[in-house]
Amino acid sequence: MGKALFITGTGTDVGKTFVTALIVKRLRDAGLDAGYYKAAISGAEKAEDGSLYAGDAMYVKEIAELSESQEELVSYVYEAAVSPHLAAELNNDPIDFDVVERDFHRALAAHDFITMEGSGGIICPLRWDAKQHVILDDLICRLNLSALVVADAGLGTINAAVLTVEHLRSRSIPVKGIILNHFHPGDIMEEDNLTMIEELTGVKGVATVQKGDETLNLDAEELAALYN
């Protein structure tokens, strides 16, 4: 059975999928058996044959050169570009978390390291109907995972990152590190953002990512040590 790590973001569009792809690629480039899994994707594009293209999962597949099919990488794919709980409602196809757990463990059994990507920020409703109320953090707890937080390097990130870390801790979810995306080395504000986040949370900034990066500037052994 492999080890796993959950990747969450401080919000939508912080570049969580881009960073996740670099994480999986870094492990694989070091010769480690690394895979990827995501429970649900909304905002999928519709192909000419009517099928839905799970862009996030397929981007990671391309960058990290994974062999799995879309169906093996993500359990639920929705067309509507809204929160998964609403997309599921609009599609009359609610997430079955027994299915998610089964698919996650199947991926875990196939690889030494599984990087599981979340949807949106940590307070992202995955299912909200008469039968179940499930937020993203509920799923992390169910799977007994630790988390790594991806945050934008720019203005406002101190508040977003600290609140995300504090919420994870309130649910007793271990936080293994923070990665700042869209980082500009030498930018005094962004450098200070990283320092303040570390000091306010006690969580290490394990890496920074710049636009167009093709690799993660983190030693593969250090990266692998974040998984459990």
Image (spheres, helix red, strand yellow):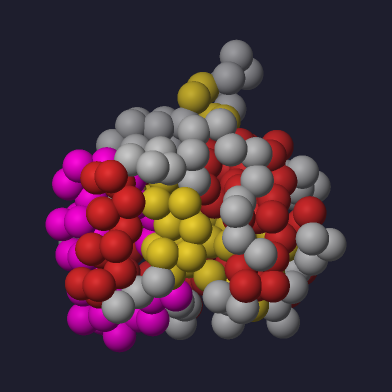
In the image: residue 172, left or right of residue 27: left
Q: Which residues are magenta?
A: 147-176
Rendered image quadrant of residue 123? bottom left
Tell me if residue 152 comes above or below residue 7 in the rendering.
above
Position of 60 with respect to 154 (left or right) is right
The residue that appears at 55% across and 75% down in the rendered structure is: 226
- 125 or 221: nearer the eye? 221
The image position of residue 196, as x and y in percent, is 23, 63
Query: Is there any visible trace of residue 181 in the rendered image?
Result: yes
Judge whether residue 127 can be spotted in this image.
Answer: no
Can you give x and y, in whole percent of width and height, for residue 133 in the image?
A: 22, 66
Instruction: Pick whichever, 154 or 100, lies toward us.
Output: 154
Asked whether 163 falls inside the magenta stretch, the response is yes
Q: Residue furthest bottom?
A: 172
Image quadrant holding the C terminus, namely: bottom right
What residue sits 25% from the left and 59% below the top?
161
Q: Is residue 190 above or below residue 50?
A: below
Q: Is residue 140 above or below residue 72?
A: below
Q: Is residue 58 left or right of residue 77?
A: right
